Image: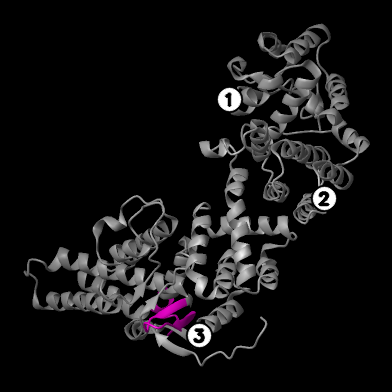
Amino acid sequence: MTEFVEIPQPSRFRISELFRDNNFIVPLYQRNYAWGTNEVEDFWGDLLELVKGYRNSHFFGQIVTYKNEQGDQEIIDGQQRLTTSTLFMAAIRDTANRMYRENFSNSQASEAELESGDLLRDVRREVDKSIRGKDHPSLIVQQNADHDQPGQSLQDYFFDLTNQVAKAASEKLTSEPKRNMQRAYKEMTHWIVAEINQEKTLAGRIDRLQLIFESFFNKFYIVMISAPSRQDAFTIFETLNSRGKDLRASDIIKNHVMSLMGTEIKPANDQWNRLTNQLDNDSDKITRFIRTYWAAKKRIVPESKLYRAISTEIKDVNTSQQFLDDLDKVVALYTVLESPTSPKAHDQYFKDHKITETLEILTRLHVKLYYPVVIAMVYKKYSEASLLKVVTKLLAIFIRHRTIINDGTNKLETGFSDVAHRIWNLDLKSVDEIIEDLNEKLLPKKDQTEASFQVLQKAGGQRGAKKWTLVYLLAELYSVEYDDFGEQLFRQVFKDDDYQLVQVDTTNAVGDDAEYLGNWTLLEKRLVKTEVQAAADLVPALQQSGLTGNQRLAQQIQNNGWSAADVRNRQDRFTADVTLIW
């Protein structure tokens, strides 16, 4: 914070007063509804403590608002709580309505039962007074059109869900904020019904429902800070939430950027929405993306310090706009790095398919640390030929550093960010300088790599990074040692997934060396019939294989058998190829 802001005297409201006395609106620049099951379950747990008499009141947190020119309270902080409150009131009203229809619609009930029915109508009436109608609702969420369901805004769906439009609770949704709203409504409805059904009589269930409603309506408290200006509200929000647990860094960063845009806030918000739509409006994804961008342009920082780092640099409308423009330029590339071959548009992002294939291999190995380098190169408009040289080097560095030597990732994360920053600032001016810098600072030495490879063991696996790491190592080694695969390596091994990892022998003949790389091979899946334990049993399948490496392995087993010494000898032979490949 660069200047002192006097925080206004907060007002303390019960939920009943809060919605009766205020008109709330979620501004376009705010994040979408993001509470999941854990947060909603915490809300319900707090309410049950009141219902069961464990406590007399509950502080539900603070909200920060700014009263705009139309007299509405723009919510700067607290929309998750207010949205959940509205969804809960709708859930309890709809439960009351169902109970009334099922038990009192025929007017055959006794006078005592009709009195209970009046309690249900009271709950419905109080909720409707708080939620209000479509013309003047107490809470309006974001009204921008939904990119997944054109024509229906988030507010349209929210209104349907909280105003008894039946399909809203059951329709299949693709929009994350709508799914979050629907899930919260359905979960709270389920919990309400389960709680009241513990009572044996209808009157008991109605009394229980009224107790739940009144506990929330009259015993939940919120402190509201209504700031004199939007800028002051943003500043208060950042002060209260920069260390909070319920917001991701991207949410606070967005509010900071929007607070600086002045009259340009609407186009800035539209730009933010366009680029974050490509990240599914997922706060976690957006945060990872911004952190990666910052690692490319400036430096790597922990997520917990990302807001502080960015807010220190972004101080006015010009730097805010540059920040948004930069994100806009690289967001499509970031989505490609996350998933290089799917959807089809990603597969066609680079004209040189060798780049895409290398990125896909890195993805199969669960490698993300290199993203800043690629982002910096594409931002600076390096040619695809140059980019291919660098991503090939990045893969080699990872294989040596992490896969073979098994060093930690901190050095790589920091190192890749430093290289990216130097590319961005033009300290590294050519692809040769980039390669030289990578070799000097991050590529492990030949002797260290070979020594580690000689004793390298891998557990294998049928899926995930463990599988693909070992598959990739063997495929490259077979290509160099036996001239297998060639140009078809990526298609056969990764795209078509034609091969399965098989241990040559798992008996006492190899002992503790069973997981050494020299005891593994790749075998066509059509040839893998049963689990093989002794090497001799694998010979027929190896002989039928189209890989020269497997045929030679079959010949060796037939002529000399298979032992721990053979495993080590085979691994030594592979070692000579390691630093040629990587």
Q: In which quarter of the image is residue 253?
A: bottom right
Residue type at numbered disc 3: Ser
Q: Answer whether labels 1 and 3 touch (C-beta < 8 Å).
A: no
Residue positioned 73% across, 14% down in the render: 550
Residue type at numbered disc 1: Asp
Foreground disc of the pair 2, 3 = 2
Residue 339 is situated, as x and y percent measured from the top left of the image, at: 58, 42
Residue 496's disc number: 1
**Label 1 or label 3, whichever comes before in sequence order:** 3
Q: Quadrant of residue 361?
A: top right
Residue 125's disc number: none
Mark 1 Cα shell of 10 Å, populated few (<14), some (14-19), many (≥20): few
Give the secondary structure at mark 3: loop
Residue type at numbered disc 2: Leu
Q: Mark 3 points at which residue?
A: 229
Give the secondary structure at mark 2: loop
Q: Can residue 313 be seen in this view?
A: yes
Mark 3 Cα shell of 10 Å, populated few (<14), some (14-19), many (≥20): few
Residue 428's disc number: 2
